[in-house]
Amino acid sequence: MVGGILAFAGIEGFLENLSDMYERSEEDDGWAGFLSAWYEVFGEEGATVSQIVDELLDSSHFADTLPPELDITDKQLTRKLGRRLAKREGFRHVNGLFIERGGTYRRAIQWRCLLTEGYTFETINKGEDDIDGFTFVRNSPWDTEKQECSSEN
């Protein structure tokens, strides 16, 4: 509807890059899995890059989700991760997660991993008390079906 109004007004090019935008958002560059694991560890609480790296060093499961351009053994991991987070701030990934600045802690930026409105986080219990994984579910107001993005175990 908006496109028709803009075209009538002589404004061309509305949403011409839509397919490129969707293609970019659906690329799996390793960040969606990393953010899923981050969300599992920290929820929507803020964490400094140093706190994130400490958790990566303590948890092999979390460390295994690092995007390919980052290496857990790199002595500059804290600096590199901080730069990557700044570049990815606000970018919505296919699982509905995105990164934003969440204040400061001792003069260091706290980063928060947030879930886009319309998505929910659900744990998958396969045993009585064990959480074996989690899934992000996109709840569409126009469709009653759920679209799931599951974590890798």
Image (cartoon, rainbow, N blue to C red):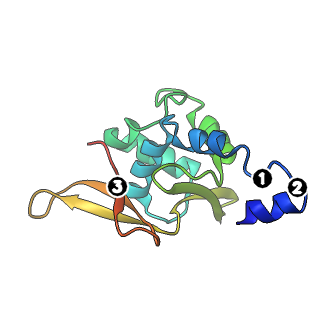
- The residue identified by callout 3 is 148
Query: On residue 78, which mark appears?
Result: none
Nearest to N terminus: mark 1 or mark 3: 1
Q: Residues within 10 Å of mark 3 (few under 14, many from 20)?
A: some
In the displayed structure, 115 sits above or below 67; it is below
- The residue identified by callout 1 is 14
Q: Secondary structure at mark 2?
A: loop
In the displayed structure, 87 sits above or below 98; it is above
From the viewer's side, name the closer residue of 24 and 11: 11
Q: Residue 40 falls in which quadrant of the image?
A: bottom left
Q: Hey, what amino acid is under mark 3?
A: Glu
Determine the residue positioned at 47% across, 27% down. 73
Determine the residue positioned at 55% across, 63% down. 46
In the displayed structure, 48 sits above or below 22; it is below
Residue 115 visible at all: yes
Q: Are marks 2 and 1 in contact (CB under 8 Å)?
A: yes
Q: Alpha carbon of mark 1 to alpha carbon of mark 3: how far?
A: 30 Å
Which residue in the rendered view is the most extreme toward the left?
128
Determine the residue positioned at 26% across, 42% down. 153
In the displayed structure, 94 sits above or below 118; it is above
Q: Secondary structure at mark 1?
A: loop
Q: Alpha carbon of mark 2 to alpha carbon of mark 1: how far?
A: 7 Å
Q: Are marks 1 and 3 in contact (CB under 8 Å)?
A: no
Residue 105 visible at all: no
Q: Hey, what amino acid is under mark 1?
A: Phe
Q: Nearer the viewer, mark 3 or mark 2?
A: 2
- The residue identified by callout 2 is 11
Determine the residue positioned at 46% across, 70% down. 142
Q: Quadrant of the N terminus?
A: bottom right
Q: Residues within 10 Å of mark 2 (few under 14, many from 20)?
A: few
